[in-house]
Amino acid sequence: MFKLTKKVEYALIALRYIQNHGNGIATSTKEISEKFSLPTELLAKVLQQLARLEILSAVQGPKGGYKLKRSLGSISLTEFVESMEGPIGLSECSINEICCQMDNCNIRFPMNKINENMITMFNNITLDELTTP
């Protein structure tokens, strides 16, 4: 089953909250963590990664936290997931051509076709579509 990781889920939850409740003011990790009952340490790492990816900007100080740095409408779901977790693939051979079953596999081509269709669909969805109410 294809499933988004907790890291990607938490990132999307945080981005939606920051986009809709930030009003240009930095939002703290603690505020998001408490609002959605997310583990603070993991959320902090996710937000730091989003800052390294230049999706968020980190604001230092007592009223510090995170603000949007990039328009979420300019980031596709594919770009986002791959920047957070690496290549999207339903099966190992969709990501990596090194597989012990490569010569004998009878599902490789149909799985790759499904994977290509999924990536095309993800390319057509922006983060803004997922984070705007």
Image (spheres, grey):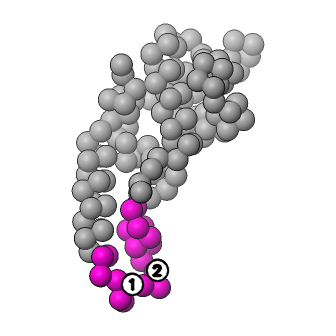
Q: Quadrant of residue 128?
A: top left
Q: Nearer the viewer, residue 115 or 73?
A: 115
Please, what is the three-letter code of the amino acid marked with disc 2? Ile
**Horizontal placement of 47 versus 81: left or right?**
right
Classify mark 2: residues with Cα within 10 Å, few (<14), some (14-19) or many (20+): few
Pinpoint residue 73: horizontal percent, then vertical percent: 34, 30
What residue do we see at 57% from left, 42% from top? Answer: 7
Above or below — where is 106 with respect to 88? Answer: below
Foreground disc of the pair 2, 1: 1
The residue identified by callout 2 is: 98
Q: Are marks 2 and 1 in contact (CB under 8 Å)?
A: yes
Above or below — where is 45 with respect to 115? Answer: above
The residue identified by callout 1 is: 102
Q: Nearer the viewer, residue 60 or 21?
A: 21
What residue do we see at 36% from left, 89% from top? Answer: 103
The dominant secondary structure in magenta is loop
What residue do we see at 49% from left, 56% from top? Answer: 86
